[in-house]
């Protein structure tokens, strides 16, 4: 049995979505981020990323984390590549070249897109977003992302997918990173292929099920 550690309001959302796509049975252990708690060591504190019980599973103290029959793994995007490869089907690579492309686009999203996109989503949800410094930071992050949006838009123009001619784990991984920038409408208006692709990814039943569970959790 696959066990996923992490609440839906975390990067574990990526793994919950993929498990849904693959139809994998799994156990969910809701580990909340310690920074969200006023007193993470309180007697009634929920299981969190600094709880000894969780640290015994993942000493890095980060979510998500999985235990797949005794194989423990961290890093949400890498976990998805592993699960897709293990269980096969249309979400996985059909050739070595496709697998390489899935890794390439996932690494690109993680290193070139996510650092800027995370700034946007964190500030957009914080009171500091209304400050001049907040506006300036969001504007700078959006400007940095414009080139990434243009690259993906041109790539999607051919097939509408990140790798191959179908929805794969690469689409899921990249879509979950681009989701962080959804408040920046101008980026999507300038990249219509990205906008259509992301909408199609988020129309999938497994994504909707994941988001319903995410929205059911306390903020």
Image (spheres, rainbow, N blue to C red):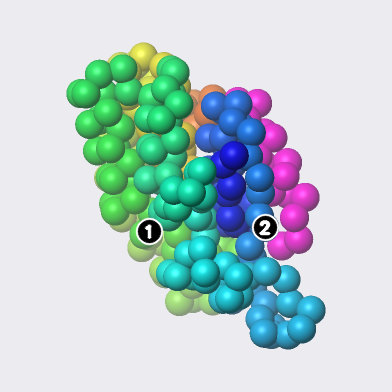
Q: Secondary structure at mark 1?
A: helix
Left or right of 104 on screen, residue 14: right
Q: Secondary structure at mark 2?
A: loop
113 in relation to 98, above or below: below
Q: Main secondary structure of the magenta part?
A: helix
* Comes first in the chain, label 1 or label 2: 2
Magenta segment includes 207: yes
Tell me the residue that label 2 is attached to: 30
Q: CA distance from mark 1 to mark 2?
A: 27 Å
Callout 1 crowding tier (Cα within 10 Å): few <14, some 14–19, many ≥20: many
Q: Please tell me which residue lies in front, 110 or 191.
A: 110
Tell me the residue that label 1 is attached to: 116
- Looking at the rendering, the stretch of residues picked out in magenta corresponds to 204-219
Residue at figure coordinates x 57%, y 41% from the top left: 2
Name the image quarter holding residue 88: top left
Q: Please tell me which residue lies in front, 145 or 203.
A: 203
11 in relation to 161, above or below: below
Residue 76 in view of the camera: no
Left or right of 10 on screen, residue 94: left
Q: Tell me where residue 91 appears, x and y as whole percent.
A: 43, 23
């Amino acid at each position: 049995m696959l066990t996923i550690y992490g609440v839906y309001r975390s990067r574990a959302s990526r793994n919950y979505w993929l498990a849904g796509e693959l139809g994998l049975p799994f156990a969910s252990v809701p580990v909340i981020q310690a920074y969200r708690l006023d007193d993470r060591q309180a007697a009634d504190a929920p299981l969190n990323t600094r709880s000894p019980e969780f640290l015994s599973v993942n000493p890095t103290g980060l979510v998500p984390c999985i235990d797949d029959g005794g194989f423990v793994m961290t890093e949400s995007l890498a976990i998805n590549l592993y699960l897709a490869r293990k269980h096969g089907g249309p979400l996985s690579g059909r050739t070595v070249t496709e697998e390489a492309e899935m890794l390439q686009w996932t690494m690109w999203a993680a290193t070139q897109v996510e650092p800027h996109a995370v700034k946007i989503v964190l500030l957009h949800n914080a009171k500091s977003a209304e400050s001049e410094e907040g506006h300036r930071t969001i504007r700078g992050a959006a400007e940095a992302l414009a080139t990434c949006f243009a690259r993906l838009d041109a790539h999607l123009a051919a097939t509408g997918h990140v790798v191959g001619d179908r929805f794969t784990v690469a689409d899921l991984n990249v879509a979950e990173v681009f989701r962080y920038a959804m408040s920046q409408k101008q980026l999507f208006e300038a990249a219509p292929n990205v906008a259509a692709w992301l909408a199609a990814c988020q129309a999938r039943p497994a994504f909707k099920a994941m988001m319903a569970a995410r929205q059911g959790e306390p903020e």
